[in-house]
Amino acid sequence: MRGGGEGGAPRREPDDQRTNTTSSQPARVHHEREKERERESAQEAIAAAAAGETPPHVSAPSPSSLLSPLLTSPSRRNPPPDAVLIGGGGGVAEWRGTTRSGSGAGGGEEDRISELPEALRLQILSLLPLKSAIRTGALSSRWRGLWAQRWPDPSSLCLCLPPGASAAARAEPLAIIDRRGRRRMDFFSFSFHSGQLTQPELKRCVEYAAACEVEVLHLRLDGGGGRGSRGGTRRPGMLAVHFPVGSPRLARLSVRGLNLTASANAMVGALEVIHLHSVPLTDAALRRVVGACPCLRELDLRYCRRLRRIDFTTVGAPSLRSFTIVDCSRATDLRVPVVPRLGSFRFSGAFHCSNILTATMGTLQHLYLCSGGPETGLPPTNLPSTIPRLSNLRVLTLCSIALQYVSVFAAKTVMESKLCNLRELHFLMFGMTNSNLADIYSFLKTCPCPQLERLFVQLPTNTRDSFTKNFLEVAEEEPPKGGLENLWLVKMTNFKGHRNEMQLVDFLLRKASCLKKLFLIAPKEDHPRGLRKIQSDVLPNFEKTEVLLLERASANVQIVFSEPNDPETQPLHSEVFVRF
C-alpha cells in the first residue's frame, strides 16, 4: 500500500486487513446532542456576522487563520451541506451545523459560506497563501478555480525563450513585465538558454518578482555548461541569483543552472520548498540558505557538484520533512542534527558515511537509497546497515548495491530487524546474477516484513541470461520460508524469463498466500519502420506459458503480462534517478 504523501492515490487494502469502522449507537446519540448544543451558538455567530459584529464567545481571527486549518485538515475538506465556518479560540476554525428552522433531517440545507458574494470570496482568497487558496476548490463548485482570479490578470507569468531566439524575442519578456506593472502575482517562471540574458537583465526579473510578492519562483538556465543541464560546476561569467530574493511571501524557490550566493544572517520566514538543480553553490552558501528558512519543509539538491560537505548541524532544520540528494558527486559527508519531522529521504549517488538515518530513526517513513549505478567494490558507508532498525519505515527502495551492503553486514553481525511497518518494497537491480538473487533472499530473511503488501522489482535490460551453473561445492542462499503473508501485489519490469528471474517468480508464487496480482512487464524493443520506431514485447509466448504453469499458493492470483494504467500499481518512488 502506497504511503501517504507526495500525491499518491489510495490503495486497496487486502480483504483480511480491512476493519469495520461503523460507529456505535451511544456515539451517534452523543454526536446528536453536541450538534443541538452547537446550533444556538452557530446561529448567534451568523447573526453577529450579518450585523458586522463578533459574538462575545467567539474570537475574530483573520480570514487567513480562519480558513487555513479547514483547508489543511483532510477531515474538514468536505464539510456537511448544513455547515458554516465559525472562528474558535486561538484562530481555530470549525464547521458547525446550521440547519434552518423547520427543516427536518432531509429538509432544506444551505452552504452559507459559498453563498457569499464573489467579491467577498475573492477578498478572503487574497488573504490566504497560494497553497491554501488553491485548496478552497474542494469546498464547492463556486470556489473551484476562483483562486486564479484573486490578482490582476495575469496572476501568473511563465516566460520562456527558445534556443536561437532573435534580439526582439529576447527583449519581449522584459517588455511583458513592464506592461503588467508591479502588481501582486502568485507564480513567476523564467526559462532561457545560455547567452540569451545578461546579469543586469536577470537581476531585473528577480527584483520584479520580489516587488510583485510572488509565492512561487522558478528560474531555469538550459545548456549552460559543457555537460548540458547537469553541469553543476561554477564557470567564469556564470549568471547568479542572490539569496534571499526579496519577496516576503516566497514559499517555493526552484533554481536550475544558475549560481546561487547567500547573505549571512538572512531570514525568510515563509519559504517552505527549495529545489536546486545543477547549482554550483558552496557548502557555506547552503548552510546560510538552510539557516535562513526556519519553515523549510522540503529540500531537493540535484547535480550540485561543488558541494563537498553537506552539514546542517550548526544551523538546524527543525521543520524539514523531505530531503533529496541526487548525484552531488563531490560530496563526501552528510551531517544533519536530530530532525524531528523528517519523513522522507532520497539519496542517489556514491555512498558515504552519514548520521542522517540514525538521527531520524524514529520518524523516517519513506527511504530511497541508490548508488547511482553499477560500481566495483563497496566503499565504507553506514547508510544501508542502519535500515533494519528503522521501525517506522513504510516505503523502502534499494538498489542492488545497497542490497549487497545489507547482505555483507548481515553475514558479519546478528541484527534484530524492526521493519514491522513496511508496506512497500522496491528493488532496483543493476544485475540479476546468482549473487543478486541471493542478496534478495538474504534481505527478506534478515529483515522480515510481516506487513509487506506491495513488491516492485526493476530488472536490468541486458538480454544475456546472467545465470551461472554452480559447479563448486558451495552452498547457495536458501529462500526465506515465510514473511510474505500479506503480500497482494508484485510487479516486475524488464522481465525476460531468464533463469534467476523465473526462480524469483516461482518463489513469490509459492510463498505469497494472499497474492492477488502479479505483473510481469517485458522490456520494449525498438524496431525501425521508416523514420519511426515502434516497440514490441520481447517475451516469447512459450515463456508466458511456463509462468502460467508454476505452482501457486494463492488460487485467486492474476498473472498479467501488459503494463497496467491503474495508479495503485505504480510504486511511490516512481521517479528513478538512474538509467537501466
Image (tube, rainbow, N blue to C red):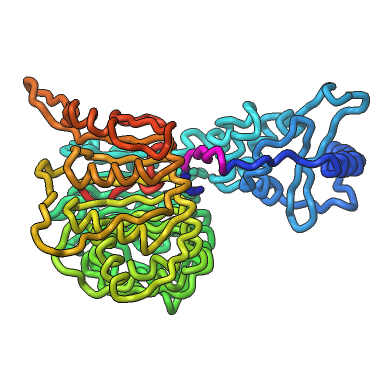
Residue 27 in view here: yes
Magenta residues, start to end = 8-16
- In the image, taking residue 522 as reference, residue 512 lies left or right, namely right
Most common SS among magenta residues = loop
Asked if 354 appears above or below 178 in the picture, the reply is: below
Q: Is residue 10 magenta?
A: yes
The residue that appears at 61% across and 43% down in the rendered structure is 126
135 left or right of 30 in image: left
Residue 343 placed where, x, y %? 48, 59
Using the image as rendered, state which of residue 49 and residue 457 is in the foreground: 457
Quarter of the rendering containing residue 547: top left
**Does 548 sit left or right of 366 as displayed?**
left
Residue at image coords 92%, 27%: 101
In the image, residue 159 lies in the stretch drawn in magenta: no
| Residue at far bottom of view | 314
Q: Position of residue 96 (x, y in %)?
A: 80, 40
Question: Would you place residue 407 above or below residue 155 in this image?
Answer: below
Q: Does 463 sit left or right of 490 as displayed? A: left
Q: Nearer the viewer, residue 31 or 206?
A: 31
Task: Out of 448 and 365, give the one closest to the viewer.
Answer: 448
Q: As displayed, is residue 272 above or below residue 350?
A: above
Query: Based on the displayed image, in which of its 4 quarters is residue 560 positioned?
Result: top left
The location of residue 415, given as percent across then percent down, is: 39, 72
Expressed as whole percent of the image width and height from the top left, the position of residue 202 reads: 30, 52
Instruction: Between residue 180 and residue 339, name the one nearer to us.
Output: 339
Observer able to see residue 311: no
At 29% from the left and 28% from the top, the residue drawn is 562
Q: Give the residue drawn at x 36%, y 60%.
A: 445
Numbered circles on residues, count:
0
Query: Based on the displayed image, in which of its 4 quarters is residue 114 positioned?
Result: top right
